[in-house]
Image (cartoon, rainbow, N blue to C red):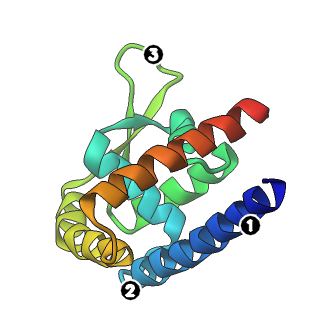
Amino acid sequence: MEELQLKAMTVMMRASQYMAEVSRQDIKRYGLNITEFAVLELLYHRGDQPIQMIGKKILIASSSITYVVDKLEKKGYVKRVHCATDRRVIFAAITDEGRTFMEGIFPQHAQQMAKMFEGLTEQELETLVSITKRVGKTAQNSL
């Protein structure tokens, strides 16, 4: 059983690496890196976010967020908005230009990502999601 578990881990890790590379290459076509895209995608789908919370939501070091927001701000895709109730909190907000940009690229990106799952049925995808979540939770609980 242990040998099969190790094989499963290796297969999942390799698949994850290949999938990340496909995603990275696709995002690069739009003049962004993976972190910039992740921040834009979060703001596009979830709205304004406190800058200090973005790192936790997209699973990157919070020390990198200020730099990424600076780069996106220079591109005109993001702006900083001060919180009206707490002056210590600054939100990152997608600009109209950023929203238009994401509306143009996100459907194409989603199609590229969906291609990786073309060989699976809907039931297989549901099973994959369920099993992957269980493995992830078990790993998270081991920390």
Q: Is residue 89 visible?
A: yes
Which residue position holds label 2? 29
Q: What residue is rendered at 41% in x and 77% in y?
A: 27
Q: Which mark is residue 86?
A: 3
Q: Position of residue 25 (x, y in %)?
A: 47, 84
Quarter of the picture containing the C terminus is: top right
Q: What residue is rendered at 53% in x and 50% in y?
A: 132
Q: Position of residue 19 (x, y in %)?
A: 51, 74
Sequence-first disc among 1 and 2: 1
130 horizontally vs 107: left or right: right
Q: What residue is rendered at 30% in x and 40% in y?
A: 46
Sequence-first disc among 2 and 3: 2
Which residue position holds label 1? 7
70 horizontally vs 99: left or right: right
In this picture, is 93 found above or below 50?
A: below
Mark 1 secondary-structure assignment: helix
Q: Nearer the viewer, residue 103 or 19?
A: 19
Q: Give the farthest residue toward the right.
A: 2
**Spatial CA span between label 2 and label 3:** 38 Å
Q: Nearer the viewer, residue 3 or 52?
A: 3
Q: Position of residue 48 (x, y in %)?
A: 33, 38
In this picture, is 65 found above or below 18?
A: above
Q: What amino acid is at disc 1?
A: Lys
Question: Dots 2 and 3: beta carbons under 8 Å?
Answer: no
Q: What residue is rendered at 64% in x and 53% in y?
A: 64
Name the image quarter holding residue 41.
Answer: bottom left
In this picture, is 49 found above or below 2?
A: above
Q: Residues within 10 Å of mark 3 (few under 14, many from 20)?
A: few
Q: What amino acid is at disc 3?
A: Asp
Q: What amino acid is at disc 2?
A: Arg
**Spatial CA span between label 1 and label 3:** 50 Å
